Image (cartoon, rainbow, N blue to C red):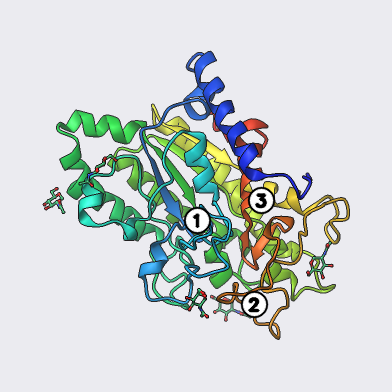
Amino acid sequence: MSLPSSLKPCLLLLFLCLLNVSTIKSKPLTQETVLFGAKFPALYVIGDSLVDSGNNNHLETIAKSNFPPYGSDFEGGKPTGRFSNGKTIADYIAIYYGLPLVPAYMELSEEQKNNTSTGINYASASCGILPGTGKQVGKCLSMSVQVDLFKETIDKNLKKKFKTQSELSKHLAESLFMTAIGINDYSFFYNKTIDANDFATKLLHEFLIQIKRLHGLGARKFFINNLKPLGCYPNIIAHTVPRGSCDDDLNLAVALYNAKLRRSLSHMKQKFSKTSFLYSDYFNFMLGLRGPSSNHASSNLMNSTSPCCPSVYDGGVLTGCRANSSSCKMPNTHIFFDPFHPTQLANFMYAIGCFQERKICHVVRD
Ligand SMILES: *[C@@H]1O[C@H](CO)[C@@H](O)[C@H](O)[C@H]1NC(C)=O
Ligand SMILES: *[C@@H]1O[C@H](CO)[C@@H](O)[C@H](O)[C@H]1NC(C)=O
Ligand SMILES: *[C@@H]1O[C@H](CO)[C@@H](O)[C@H](O)[C@H]1NC(C)=O
Ligand SMILES: *[C@@H]1O[C@H](CO)[C@@H](O)[C@H](O)[C@H]1NC(C)=O
Ligand SMILES: *[C@@H]1O[C@H](CO)[C@@H](O)[C@H](O)[C@H]1NC(C)=O
């Protein structure tokens, strides 16, 4: 998959919006249109740095991105705490569904929380599904805490916004709940001495507990992203032999989790009536961007091995972009903005692949 580097994401964005309108109008209400063509009143986001929109700005941690060059292409070039030069996949999903970009929970005042019914983002960089994940680098909101905060949003804010219980239930049942979380559990706790199957089973068990909690709170529509091919990310391939090749064992371990996740969602679909799941194959999307060969992305016009910044790895210690780093002049000629996160253009291509081509995202059937 390749795009000319001169392609302007903003023009494509316009196209994406038009596409959305035409999808909504024509089709009958099938499983397909329930998730692809629907109008959702709100988007609630549970996740990690892939979709954090500013929560970590307010937490004591080194996992932050609220300084330049982050955000250089975001609405006038302002860093927001998004780990990219521009929009995240959560932003593109909101745009596709005609919703405002979802504000970070920690950025909202109590008054704003009382007045927000189009969705809140609880995602927190460095965190994961297991409670210990990410705590090595500072504070963050693990998945169970994110669900706790969502429950608090219902009890303190949404119950006030919606006059009756049935109005509130309707809002929750019609809203979209997106998740993108779990890869940091691999980053911090998985290694070759651990049984990949056991690890995946345990992690998925914890993930499903939180999905069931969300269901118990009234969520009925889920947009579940699987886990990225961590073994091909710049922070990993800087250490592989030969340098730049993917860590296939790590990718296999993650793929095992993804396969189990996919099956579990089918089972859940059978168990829960009136519940829909959209499964997004983020793993294969990112592998596809890397190109057909696992060592060289020769046909690809985007640089798929080196992040935009830092341009040079600092003695093997891989950090994100340094503040005011000037190394990253043309972010959208890269797939990765920093060693852990994609550029806006990669995120935009995800939206095209998911919503237009429908290659990445699939409705889960029972
Ligand atoms: C928000 O709503 C709660 C009630 O749900 C109320 O106690 C609180 O004072 C409100 N806060 C603001 C700032 O309006
Ligand atoms: C509440 O939200 C509405 C619509 O988003 C906005 O027009 C209004 O100014 C907000 N009110 C407060 C008190 O924030
Ligand atoms: C692998 O992970 C386990 C559990 O987190 C840890 O106890 C062990 O020291 C790790 N081994 C290596 C080689 O890093
Ligand atoms: C990617 O960028 C790095 C650093 O700027 C450069 O060394 C490398 O050759 C580039 N790779 C490709 C395939 O363009
Ligand atoms: C980065 O640049 C901005 C704007 O020029 C400045 O306010 C900030 O202090 C700089 N940060 C660092 C760490 O140099």
Which residue position holds label 2? 318
Kindly state the secondary structure of the residue where label 2 is placed. Answer: loop
**In the image, which disc is placed on residue 346?**
3
| In this view, 277 is above or below 256 | above
Position of residue 235 measured from the top left corner of the image (x, y, whole percent): 67, 71
Report which quarter residue 220 is drawn in.
top left
Mark 3 or 1: the one toward you: 3
- Chain-order first, disc 2 or disc 1: 1
Instruction: Name the mark nearer the viewer: 3 or 2.
Output: 3
The three-letter amino acid code for the residue at tag 3 is Ala
Q: CA distance from mark 3 to mark 2?
A: 21 Å
- In the picture, the disc for residue 181 is 1
Horizontal side, residue 148 vs residue 94: left or right: left
Residue 281 appears in the figure = no
> Is 19 drawn above or below residue 240 in the view shown?
above
Kindly give the residue lying farthest to the front in the view shown. Answer: 76
Q: Residue at x 79, y 46 (%)?
A: 4
